Image: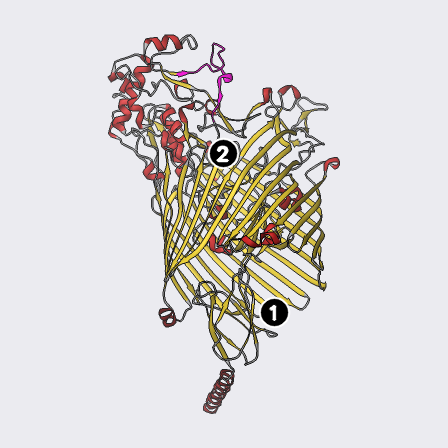
Amino acid sequence: MRSRKLLGLKSLMLFLFILLSVTNIQSQNTTITGTVSDTNNGLPIPGVTIIVKGTSTGAVTNFDGKYSINAEIGDVLLFSYLGMEDKSVTVTQTTMNVSLDESVEGLEEVVVIGYGTQKKKEITGAVGSVKAQDIENIVTSDLGNALQGQVAGVNITASAEPGGQSEILIRGITSISGSNTPLFVVDGIPQEGDPGIPPTEIESIDILKDAASAAIYGTRGAAGVILITTRQGKAGSLSVKLNASYGLQHITSGTPLMNTAQQTYFNLVRDRNQTGSTDDITVLNFTRSPLSFQNDTDLSELVFIDNAPIQNYTINVSGGTKDITYSVITNLYEKEGIIINSNFKRFSTRANTTYNHGKWRINATAGLNREITDRSPGGIITQTVRYFPTQQGLNINSDDPLISLRGDESNRLGWVIDSFDNTDNARRTRAYAQFNANYEFFKGLNIVARVGINETNEIRERFNGYTPVFNAISGEEISNPANSFVQNDASRWSSNTFDSFLTYKKSIGDHNLTFTAGASREEYVYRNFTAKKYAVASNDIRVLNNATLNPDARSGNNYTNTIVGYISRIQYNYKGRYLLSSSVRRDGSSKFGLDKRWGTFPSISVGWNISDEPFWAPVKSTVNNFKFRASRGTVGNERFSPYAFSAGITQGLDYAFGSGEGALNLGAAQSQFANAVVQWETSIQNNIGFDLGFFKNKFTLSAEYYNTEKEDMLFPIVLPGSTGGGNNSQVVLNVGNMTNKGFELSAGYRGEIGNLNFRMNGVFTTNENEITKINGEGGFLFTNDFGLISGAKSSSQVTVLAEGYEAGAFFLYPTNGVADTPEKLAEYQQLEPNAELGDLIYVDSNGSGDISDADRVYSGSGLPEYEIGYNLNLDYKGFDLSMQWYAALGHELMNGAEATAYGYGRHRDLIYAWSDVNQDSPIPAYRGNVKDHPNYKGYTDLWLEDGDYLRLKNITLGYSFSKKITEKLGISKFRIYATAQNALTITNYEGFDPEVGGGIQARGLDKGRYPITSQYIFGLNFNF
């Protein structure tokens, strides 16, 4: 045994000796060190790639621009960095400091376009670009939130709900019945909807805004295209980057509600207004409810959770050689909601590997996202408003029965307590893989093949609990256990995409030609299954078997969609001066009938680099870049419900047939109407733009003007009952046209003052939307929105589709104050004979002598006329400061939270409402809720407010420690930072927040949406 131990020890010593010998031999190789800096300002450049020519040996400069690489005297080092001219340097000594020249055009920078790339100088369409550094300071789960205010012509309404996705409009509204979400393409693979990719995984984003750029995507390009390039590895030594942050969310707004004393006074005034009685003792009902006036319940203390945490952690490992590079990035993001029972957590990982050798370039990607989303109880904010302070306080952790007196208050009590037991949990797992192979047959001719697979599975578990509520006098149970339920949904989305295309590049003298041709196939499959049971036995057990009544199991809206496309494009330039690009895509979609399945989408764009002309030479030192662009293109939109061309059949409609009394046979009947000739919406867009660069592109300016005509817009038309389709039967028809036109301006400036380096850019956008044709009487049609106030659609529906106005325009009843004098009342009673003193005066807009829907007038919309974004970045001796501002102007909002609080007798200002002892009040008398009395209906201009706002979206202050400290820690970079998001909002809007989405039908309707918070975050960055 001892001899074995000695033999093992000797073997170990021999191994260590050999290892040290090898290390010593390697150490004798020449190590070349140095610093890479910017020629213009002498500042070090981090992230420069260095390769020993003809070998796989590589390195990357650290934060201070320093590098170290093994090479021999006489070897050639290749230095490359985006936005800089590549440089080759022959090794003559062990210390080689190198300076890189900025690319004069900016701009040999490569921009991703559909099915290829192009130098920025050669772009002829409207393409906006955002780099990782532009969004890296914004802590969010949603890409749209990070993009807001970054690109002209891209309107984004952020979502505050944990896990919520922003609403993105590129150059205005695309469709009023289908989806307005742009097409997302990740590393060349089209996605179905927003892919939910974490911003930390993104290297760059290129946005195709005009139809000429997006036409290469045919049927799916009408809403614009967002091309995402994920982080790729770079040749050089192993790099490890860690970013960790933690913060708190602060609630900054709310609706002022009455306390018990105020509510009691208001109730007295209300009942006097309704009955005329002055017997306050009777009104107060002390004998029935002696304890009510001892309560002072504020339900918001249970509903809202201030200072909820938010945290984000990312680690990126990358590196490689000349031939093989890799990048693996993992992210954990968690946001606890500020409303009870809401939360979002996401774990994601993505691995990119690229092989580049000889004629082959192969890229493979695989990844996994797992999301857990807890949604807040539906309508909980509205219920918080409607719950009286005189009602009993709630112990949400107790299952004890509740005692209540009156019917309406009992209902509220039951709804509220059940909402606290309401949970809605979704667990979604998304796995994806893609493979991209590029082979060069000979110089200039390449074939590319791409395959992408996405598989998403979601289990959603919903529970609506039950707590008994009893009448205090009769002892009868008021609540109904059959209203409680357990529901489980299982859903699966899968997609398979494949495309292959040839690219041929040829230069003949000064003539440069690129030809692309190929084909693509995309298949999208959705499957869903739902199981539901009512009457839960216990709030502690949240599975299907815990419920006992009315089991229900059914399939959902299952579908399979397939898109096949053929692509061709030609790009030409002469000396890089005169530019031409033209493409045609022929698409077929299974969403349409056989006769309408195929469409053709052409485009053409031209450009002229005027600054390359000889006559421009005298001013080129000042205006180094001047390019004019013009384009025209056609794109389609097929985003509407599948199978609209085919009639729907419903099973289970049994019928009497055959012998025997009451004999029933299994039956089915047509339940939906079909339109075999339904076809896609078509958008035709003209675009004119120019780009200017001053002083070697230190100052850049771009401007665009566009005009889009949308034809054959898809509308779901509600048919009359006489057609035999039953209530609310619909058919999809192409019966609408619409236009969008606008102006976009982007400007940027960068420079330095001593040790201070700065970079700023700003965007300005206008958009004018108009419906030019609409189905409906007089070109006027209400949308399918459910109204401004929950549960009161007929009293608060305000958005319409009308010829000559923007989609989702507000049409409201105008009002003219309060009938607070006998003279005003007498005049108003000619229109409304039953009006009383203190009532709201409706205006007879059309002079018909009565008040009807015809008196509604156009009152604006929730679509901004102007948008402004401004970004500033400063660096000074290790300190960095960045700010992002965003403003939306020229739109209106309907304050639904206030309308609800007034409409149900809860807003604090109602204590100042008109009464017989307060006859000078401008606030109408309260005589009944929003459903019962016209004074507080949701469709009047009482709730219309100016929606303009200016917001400081993000401000970040960071400090990077010096090299002396980082070397002691054994790392290459150590940075700490503090960030404030949504820290300041300047607005006159009195609701929760002026940033109100809601889709096209409810844009600008603030219905008690999830409140936006201010977020204060601290974090650190490590680079190893």
Residue 825 or 751: which is nearer the viewer?
Answer: 751
Q: Looking at the image, can residue 884 be seen?
A: yes
Quadrant in which the C terminus is drawn = bottom left
Q: Looking at the image, can residue 469 be seen?
A: no
The mark that comes first in sequence, 1 or 2, is 1
In magenta stretch: residue 449: no
Prevalent SS, magenta region? loop
User: Amino acid type of disc 2?
Assistant: Leu
Image position, residue 562 (x, y; %) = 68, 44
Q: CA distance from mark 1 to mark 2?
A: 50 Å
Q: Which residue is mark 2?
A: 863
| Left or right side of 499 for 896 | left
Residue 784 or 824: which is nearer the viewer?
Answer: 824
What SS does tag 2 mark?
loop
Count of numbered circles on the image: 2
Q: Residue furthest right?
A: 595
Residue 1001 or 953: which is nearer the viewer?
Answer: 953
Q: Which mark is residue 955?
A: none
Q: What's drawn in magenta, residue-wise?
A: 841-859
Image position, residue 338 (x, y; %) = 38, 43
Residue 290 or 162: which is nearer the viewer?
Answer: 162
Q: How is the image coloured?
A: secondary structure
Position of 188 relative to 42 (above/below): above
Disc 1 packing (10 Å; few <14; some 14–19; many ≥20): some
Q: Which residue is mark 1?
A: 323
| Left or right side of 977 for 435 | right
Q: Are marks 1 and 2 in contact (CB under 8 Å)?
A: no
Position of 421 relative to 912 (above/below): below
User: Amino acid type of disc 1?
Assistant: Asp
| Left or right side of 145 for 294 | left
Q: Nearer the viewer, mark 1 or mark 2?
A: 2
Disc 2 packing (10 Å; few <14; some 14–19; many ≥20): many
